[in-house]
Structure formats: C-alpha cells, structure tokens
Image (tube, rainbow, N blue to C red):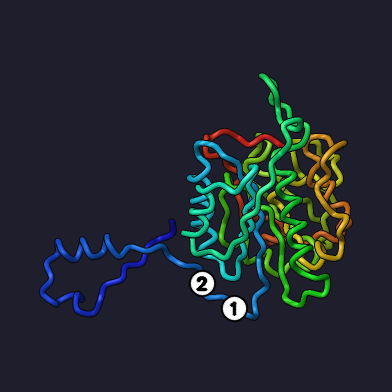
Amino acid sequence: MAPSRLRVSGRHRAGSGVSGRHRALMARKDYVYSRPPPWSKTLPTLHIITPTYSRTVQKADLTRLANTLLHVPNLHWIVVEDSKNRTALVSRFLQETGLKYTHLNVETPSNFKPKGETKSRKIPRGTLQRNLALQWLRETYSVNFSQPGVVYFADDDNTYSLQLFEEMRYTKKVSVWPVAFVAGIRYETPKINALGKVYGFKTKFDPTRPFAIDMAGFAVNLSLILSKPQANFQLQGVKAGYQESSLLKELVTLSELEPKASNCTKVRKDDFLTRGKDKKQS
C-alpha cells in the first residue's frame, strides 16, 4: 500500500534502553497502512468509478491504484466487480485500504462475452459496471444534492498523476485533458483554439468520433450526472471506441468541454497495462 507509518509506544522511544533488534520487531508488529487525508467540508468530493474483474494481476492493479488514491482528499471510490457476487478478495482489500468506498457487483451476461478463440466483445469490458455505478449515484443522491462532486472513470490497470485529481475537482460540466499511450501513440489530446475552446481531437483511432477521447480523459460534474438520468454508456449498437461518445453526447456539446492540464498541454495520466502492452481502444 502507500508509505507506512510506525507506531512506537512512549516507553519504547529512542534512548529508552530497548535494543535495536527489539525496536525492529516492534516496528514490524505495529505496521499499519497509511490513511487518506482528513475529510474537508469545503472540497468537492471525487467519485472515482473503477470496474474490475478476476484475473491474476487484479489485486496488484487495485493496490497500485489505491496507493495513488490514498493521497487524494475527499475521495469516494466506487469499485464494481464483473462478478455474480462480491468476492472475498476485493472485499478484504477494500476494507484494508482505509479509503471511503462503495463495493458493487454486476456480472456481464455470457452472451456479451467473447467465445472460443475470438476476442471481439459485443459490449466493451466494464460497460455494465460503469452504468451500475452511475445508477447507484442517482439512487443515492437527489438532483438537488447540495454537496458538490465530480465523477471520474479510473480503470484499475492505469497510472495517474496526483495533479490530475486536483484539476478535475472543480469541473463545472465536463473537463478534458491529454492521455498518454493510447491506441499505439505517445498521447492523444483535445485540440484547443485561440479562444481556449475544444474544436477537435488529436488521436490515431477514428478522429471523426463525436468525442474522440479515452475513457480516462474526462470528468463529469456530479450534478450533471444526476440531472441527466438518460445519460449512460450505450450497451448495443455502438461501434468500438464510441462508448465515451454515447455518454458525453447526452451531457454536453463539444464547445462546452473544459480544457485542463494547462490548456491540454500536459499529460496527467498514463494508460498503461500491467502486462506491459499498449492498451487497445475499447
């Protein structure tokens, strides 16, 4: 997890006569995870939605992401398993992080999953899970919910800069920024005109998409999610790479996007797979 803190009782402080060997044993015994910063009533809450599924590196991926999230104040982690039940592995893991979290699950039906040697999917991985998280937010918070918040989709196999979370925190509608290592290129980014408005996207994969952006390249104000109940990731009839557009077109127009990361000149997030291969566009 994140860097540890050590608890040493008063009678065992330096100079108390306890040998180095015994102090080391005490330190190992009293090891505890770090905890996130204190909750602030003045900061907007970041609702981080992470779909996850069982695999060899699942816990390693979740651990790396949790280590980052532990440094972010006012963060609520919504973890949604692609599973019939919430697994013991993920349940225990979340309990030990010290993060404020919500643990959900919904299994992707077998008829939507790849069969045999084909790797094509009828719906991109994580679609049902992200939609369940959006449903949970709408059922939990009313449209007139007064506490400001922002919704962000963070996959468990990515790495994130801490600055990214602070920049998205004050999103008015939908904020955007560059993303590294997507679709086989170093980075993709929104194109910004002289007025500071988004007018298109620099990307290798189908730049004609309504919103040619990676799942991790935008954040949405919570009030906008609550006020637009029809806005979800479309399950069927959507071409590969158009999931983001299916949600965003229900929320904003291109000109309403809010460029972050120094007017989209800096990369705040790396799209990175644990197995070391470029992540393909969903």
* Residue at the (71%, 39%) spot, across then down: 108
* Residue at the (80%, 47%) spot, across then down: 233
* Residue at the farthest front position: 85
Q: Is residue 42 above or below residue 29?
A: below
SS class of the residue under badge 1?
Answer: loop
- Is 207 left, or right, of 168 in this rendering? right
The residue labelled by disc 1 is 40
Q: Tell me the kind of residue under disc 1.
A: Ser
* Residue at the farthest top position: 117
- Is 143 left, or right, of 33 in this rendering? right
* Residue at the (69%, 46%) spot, across then down: 106
> For residue 148, which quarter of the picture?
bottom right
Task: Work out how far the residue at label 1 is from the one at label 2, CA to CA, in angstroms.
Answer: 9 Å
The residue labelled by disc 2 is 37
Q: Tell me, yes or no, whether the two marked residues, 1 and 2, touch with CB atoms within 8 Å.
A: yes
* Residue at the (76%, 69%) spot, across then down: 141
Numbered tag placed on residue 282 in the rendering: none
Q: Tell me the kind of residue under disc 2.
A: Pro
